[in-house]
Amino acid sequence: MQVNTLIIGAGAAGMMCAAHAGDSVLIVDHAKTAGEKIRISGGGRCNFTNMNTTAANFLSQNPHFAKSALKRYTQWDFVSLVASYGISYHEKSLGQLFCDDTAKDIVAMLLSEMKQAQLWLKTEVGEISHDGSHFHVTLTRDGQATQVTATNLVMASGGKSIPKMGATGLAYQIATQFGLNVIETRPALVPLTFTDERFKPLTGTALPTRITANGTSFDEAMLFTHRGLSGPAILQVSSYWKDGDAISTNLIPQIDLYSILRDARHTDGRKAVTTIIGQHLPAKLVSYLADEIDMSGTIADQSDAKLQTLCENLQNWVQTPTGSEGYRTAEVTLGGIDTNDLDSKTMAAKSMPNLYFIGEAVDVTGWLGGYNFQWAWSSGWAAGQAITAR
């Protein structure tokens, strides 16, 4: 069987590429249905992009690499596509756009957009080789092997995150086979864990925070779990955190806590410090913190120095996670195909212009909030356009 373009991976990036790669396209996936990660994302409503997307919202060894694709196919281009299909959506917070109804609407839209392509599901990828002009790939479907010859090969098979959905890191293997460098990978947008289960008594408690890891801060909610810490703020900083690093949490970031406590000495002097703090933090958390932070006595008993120390402890609460929940629950994979080996305009390997890498497989990792989907759309579009122009 001969095709112009073979795309491995029918996820967000692969489907977007298939929609723009012209004629004679075969897109394959091991899953039973296309777009599985789209379907489960955003609580089933798919946070399909972010209105605030810029290259600054992505981590990469080369922070400039993503600029070309993101500027040529923007979040507004994808929003226009969504609107053209009559899919209703809303902004949840911080520029995040979600479907009003179901993520399946996005999958259906992409399937319609790539209707000129052949889609093979429940298909395993075997040996891949290149003879100097064409790729030769062994595909197995329903127990039958098919030899496919393709002028262009697009790796859209994602990273290592959520292995229960079949993530294998295949793109990294193919990159290495053809001489491309792979930046060391690790789980990102992932809950952080503590082996002593110290936060088990606080399981289910959530609050707005400002969390900092290695100089980067995020103001979002944090959630205590029986295994450690989660919630949007933790997922965000996990991309900047490395094993052995401490994280700093401002438990009361929205107010001038010191001024409030000083004023309380005059207006509520007889009240316990824990009572005053409890007006701004969950009671269960105040009780827990009282074991490690001195909150004894009434507010009237506290000197300015003691109040400053208390504020410092609450607004710079330092913890050192022992690990993360790993690829099992990580939303994305940090690292991947070295962008120095790729053309930022076409997403093709510089050493082999008809071999493309797109989406999560590339060393471009977005923040939480729709950014990684936008990278999938933009990089998939860029590769598709390049293939059509060849």
Image (cartoon, rainbow, N blue to C red):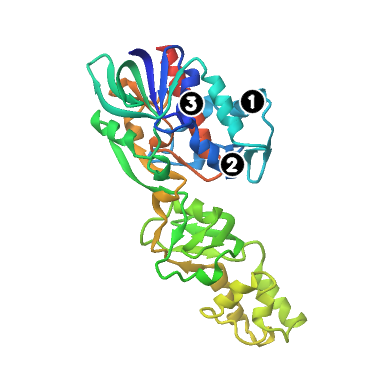
**Which label's residue is closer to the chain start, 1 or 2?**
2
Mark 3: which secondary structure?
helix
90 or 390, which lies in front? 90
Q: Tell me the amino acid under the disc marked 3.
A: Met
The image quarter in which residue 25 lies: top left
- Quadrant, the C terminus: top left
**Which label's residue is closer to the chain start, 3 or 2?**
3
Q: Tell me the amino acid under the disc marked 1.
A: Ser
Residue located beneath label 2 in the image: 44
Query: Which numbered disc covers residue 80?
Result: 1
Q: CA distance from mark 1 to mark 2?
A: 21 Å
Residue located beneath label 3 in the image: 15
51 or 305, which lies in front? 51
* Disc 1 and disc 2 in contact, CB within 8 angstroms: no
Q: Residue at x 67, y 29 (%)?
A: 87
Q: Tell me the amino acid under the disc marked 2.
A: Gly
Q: Position of residue 276 (x, y in %)?
A: 69, 77
For residue 161, say whether it is visible: no
Q: Nearer the viewer, mark 3 or mark 1?
A: 3
50 lies above or below 304: above
Q: Position of residue 243 (x, y in %)?
A: 36, 58
Q: Residue furthest right?
A: 267
Q: Nearer the viewer, mark 3 or mark 2?
A: 2
Q: Position of residue 59 (x, y in %)?
A: 44, 43
The image quarter in which residue 246 lies: bottom left
Mark 2: which secondary structure?
helix
64 lies above or below 286: above
Q: CA distance from mark 3 to mark 1?
A: 17 Å
